[in-house]
Image (cartoon, coloured by chain):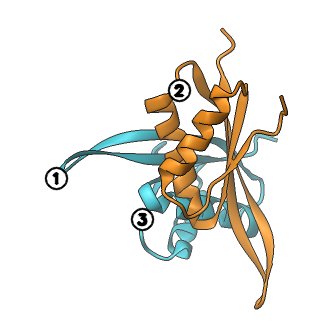
Chain colours: A orange, B cyan
Amino acid sequence: MTKDNTVFVGNKPVMNYVLAVVTQFNNGADEVSIKARGRAISRAVDTAEISLNKFLDNVEKKNIATSTEVIDTDSGRTNVSSIEIILSLNSV
Amino acid sequence: MTKDNTVFVGNKPVMNYVLAVVTQFNNGADEVSIKARGRAISRAVDTAEISLNKFLDNVEKKNIATSTEVIDTDSGRTNVSSIEIILSLNSV
């Protein structure tokens, strides 16, 4: 099993991403990373909260980190905020 | 000085909230809490990132927490995600 279980949250309905997270845990992942940038950050938080509250037992938020990324666009460089939420199986 | 230095982020331009955060530190706060719900979560992350990268020296992210709040609306109860980002003076 690979260690790179990352779900990138974009502009689709939140349940798409919840399903992706839950599926990764059901497939045996110990840890899933939820990442998003810009306005999708709110949806990433929704994804984590809904996954934890409604679908996943024995999983907890391990870490939440925010950062600033520099993006090249047609009109030059711009900064965009990003978030990474790591969900992890409880080691009980 | 009160310990309750909280900036609630809503739908105004992000620089309004950055200014509020920076002002609290300039007024002697050791710690400022940035809170938001729902779609304003992205803007709360922007507020923290811009404050830290462009305006505040010697301040760091102390903690980031997300949670789910239950809100009563006209059409019944609904869940909304929330975030709290705590910025704190470095204790060097």
Image quarter where the C terminus of chain A lies is top right
Instruction: Name above or below for residue B86 compared with residue B47.
Output: above
Whether residue B1 is visible here, answered yes or no, is no
Of residues B6 and A10, the one nearer the viewer is: A10
**Residue A50: where, in percent of width, then height?**
47, 39
Between disc 2 and disc 1, the foreground one is: 2
Instruction: Name above or below for residue A86 compared with residue B44.
Output: above
Residue named by callout 2: A56
Residue B14 disc label: none
Q: How many marks?
A: 3
Q: CA distance from mark 2 to mark 1?
A: 27 Å
SS under mark 2: loop
Q: Quadrant of residue B44?
A: bottom right
Image quarter where the N terminus of chain A lies is top right
Residue named by callout 1: B75
Residue named by callout 3: B10
Q: Is residue A80 left or right of residue B34?
A: right
Q: Which residue is found at the position 52% from the left and 21% from the top?
A: A57
**Residue B78: where, in percent of width, then height?**
28, 46
Image mark 3: chain: B
